[in-house]
Amino acid sequence: MSKKRKHIHILDGMSLYTRDRSPFYWGYLNIGGKIFKKSLKTTDRKEAEKLLFAWKNEIFSNSMNLSDDQDHIEDHDHSKQEVIVDDKRRKALLITSGIMGAVTVAGFAVPFLSAWKPSEKAKALGASVKFDLSKLQPGAMAIVEWRRTPIFVVHQTQEAIDNLPKLNSKVTDQANDVLPSSNNKFTVLKGVCTHLSCAPKYHPEIEPKAWDQDWLGGFFCPCHGSKFDLAGRVYKGVPAPINLEIPPHTFSGNTLIIGESA
Amino acid sequence: MSEKENSKSFMSSMMSWIDRRFPVTENLERHLTKHPVPKKVNFYYLFGALLMVVFMIQVITGIWLMMFYTNTEEGAFASIEYIMRDVEYGWLMRYMHSTGASAFFFLMYFHMFRGLLYGSYQKPKELVWLFGCFLLFLLMAEGFLGYVLPWGQMSYWAANVILSLFGAIPYIGPDLQVWIQGDFVLSGITLSRFFALHVVVVPLLMIALVVFHIFALHEVGAGNPEGVDIEKHRDAKGMPLDGAPFHPYKTFSALPAMGIFFIVFFAIVFFAPTGGGYLIEKPNFEEANFLKTPDHIAPVWYYAPFYSILRAVTFGIPFLGITSKFLGFIIFAASIAILFVVPWLDRSNVQSIRYKGIYSKIAMILFASSFITLGYLGTKPVNELRTLIAQICTIFYFAPFILMPIYTKYEKTLEVPERL
Amino acid sequence: MKKFLILLIPLSIFIYSAGENKCGSLEKCDYYSADVHDTYSLQRGLGIYMNYCSTCHTLELLRWNRLQRDLDIPETILIEDLIANPDIKIADYMTFGLPEVSAIGAPDLTLRTRVRGEDWIYTYLRTFYEDPEQLTGTNNLVYPGTSMPNILVGLQGIQTLDNDGTIKLKSEGSLSRAEFDDSMKDLVNFLAYASEPARITREKNGIFVILFFIIFTAVMWLLYREYAKEIK
């Protein structure tokens, strides 16, 4: 039984056909130009044929008695009602219900997908962190935790600020010789090496180091020897490809707010 | 035009490639598209499809809840409130899951009552019925295990009551109870194992049994309210004359039913998720406290009839050494177990209640009304009158089954028509 | 068949309310069902909570920022007037540094309305009366022997218990009886909100979901009928 429509010619003005997705036979009669269609409610070809002939006879006898029998007219109307075939309606309904189904599935998906977004708890833990700068002495560094990441807050000395341009030839990102924060006394950096996510160490001392004879202060990553200056700029010829990242932050008087950009 | 035809032939050749190796089309036709179902059935025959929908809701919301739930004594209660407040749409997941549990039982009870009414357990459908009864048992276990997880006052004390039933079994009882609990009292250890059972073991068994249930059903064919065997009269192609293919006739009849179900389901989820204390009980919003029993321990509505039977047994059999507590447990277990043997209790020559005699009809009315009355009583505190009513109803609950071999054999039945 | 359906009617009766309806020493609690959609009422309720309840009780599951969002509170008012403590972050819970169960044994109020019911809380707050035998000097009809003092006495006035078990006002408080009842409704609304902040969205959006499924059912019904007529 194929899903396609079938059309079976039987006699002139008489045929059987099936409709989309339906195994049931429908009858088609053309009696003197009048067209009748109805479902024969069977999937059996032979029975359908038999019913079709019976139906034809019925219509013939009805039309003969038409003038004198009121009941038969109603019968006739009734059979006409059954006749209504509307493939367009069926198709429209299939499409509409298909859309309804899709909307339902999409509607169900929304809450389930949004449930994976950071919860209020995660947001609370990831909320901005305040840090009081007044107690941080020049040259000192504080580590503040924000979103499970150490944030380095460095109070730069005047000497360190003056030294920055001297390092221009050694770092990749030469143009950036000012401090990478909106306040030119404090540097705020993510304490995560941009190479393989170790935590760099803070070495503000200006003295020869094992890794650099002309060290002017900065960050040194003990894992793979990446070097950064005090502004977080990465040195040339080290494994780390880019500068230390700067978290969103803003200053409000003596308070540093990490996690909110100005 | 030709492109379209090309893509069609590509699809069909791909399908035949797959079918050669994995019979997709054959199975789809056998179980979905061409599977013949009786033409004329009533709304009772839609509960099976709705149960599948609810099962899916429970599995999906359950998986999501599991992502946020903590299965420890310290964290369980707080994690539920975390889901309710902090997880986006967490409240919806939880309410859908809790309402889904009620819906599951509601539909299950109707689905089984349909089976009783129209003889959906008679030869050759015994296994379909048995798998269904196992599913009811598993559902009750699943519901109970899940009920403990929020670790509220009612979770704790209701679990205590049920677990102490195992302790009532002579000789092995107390040890069995400790073994189930994994502790000398109901504790976080019990909670952890109940969690594992609730989310993995029981659902897996249920999925397997649902598959068995449906395979068995498709082997013997679905019934109808008339109890007519549609397989008797077939057309030339072997399609039953009173049957219609599952798709589109059955599938499309399930869709409006699904719509109505969702209207009711979401009306509860959005406007009465606690159901006035029947779906989520008030004391369960308080964390489990092993020093303080709630004033009144009532089961959720879907256990109420069985709980009522349990409480109705106020006497034991002293000379056999059976305490009232143990006897209650036995009768409680029997109230579910008796459903398993129904196929062998019914000796009637007709399937449907429509053609059975007056005694079968009275029996069904007695059974249904006593089940509902027991359910009502189960949620109320006991007093003497209520206990007496519960005892009478317990008898009425069992009588239709125990007397079934007699009245179904001797009562006068009507003649069943040949065709639907 | 219809007979069996009629049997289901008792089901609808017992869905109505769980347990016995007794309300402490009262036969029934005064009916009140909280309205969480009246933002002004919630704000007034929050005011009463902050002024009277929060000295002893906590809301250990409600976050300040959730409260701010749901009750439409400007940030400056939240931080300066409500929290008024630079150490408390806006994502913190409304505990005011009180321990989980405070030393005086006042329970946490977040889930109380769900445990007790809105009726119960509403009636409880309004049925304190003078009782010299109690440590606190007051007793309660709904919860006899309660250890909570009648903190709202200034608003309500002093009540006494008559011999016939009814409550009489002995001296006026700053609010009239109707005003006091309204304030208590505000407070219950607020506590009901605190017990389930999602209730606002839940009740607001539920109607759309249900309307959608009504249309869904209608379309599916037409589809079903279109096919069913072939086999009828």
Image: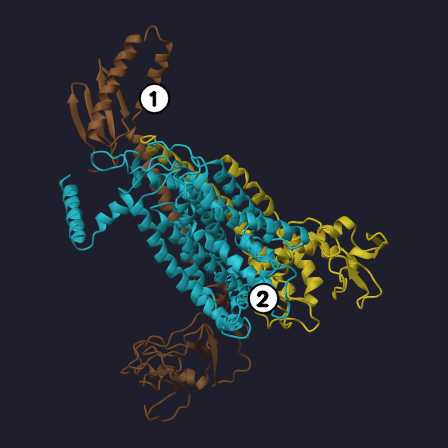
Please name whichever residue, C176 or B220, is drawn nearer the observer in this view of the structure. B220
Q: Position of residue B132 (x, y in %)?
A: 40, 52
Q: Position of residue B205 (x, y in %)?
A: 38, 60
Q: Position of residue A79 (x, y in %)?
A: 32, 20
Chain B, colour shown? cyan
Q: Amino acid at mark 2?
A: Glu
Which residue does the image show at 31% across and 39% down from the upper left?
B248
- Which residue position is annotated with label 2? B287
The quadrant the N terminus of chain A occupies is top left
Chain C, colour shown? yellow
Q: Which chain is brown?
A: A
Give above or below for B108 relative to A250: above
Please name whichever residue, B221 or A238, is drawn nearer the observer in this view of the structure. B221
Which residue does the image show at 46% across and 53% down from the upper left?
B338
Output the chain of dot 1.
Answer: A
Please name whichever residue, C167 or B153, is drawn nearer the observer in this view of the structure. B153
Q: Is residue C37 visible?
A: no
Q: Which mark is residue A81?
A: 1
* Residue B234 quadrant: top left
Evaluate if marks 1 and 2 touch, with contact meaning CB atoms under 8 Å apart.
no
State the separation of the CA atoms marked 1 and 2: 65 Å
Q: Position of residue B198 (x, y in %)?
A: 44, 63
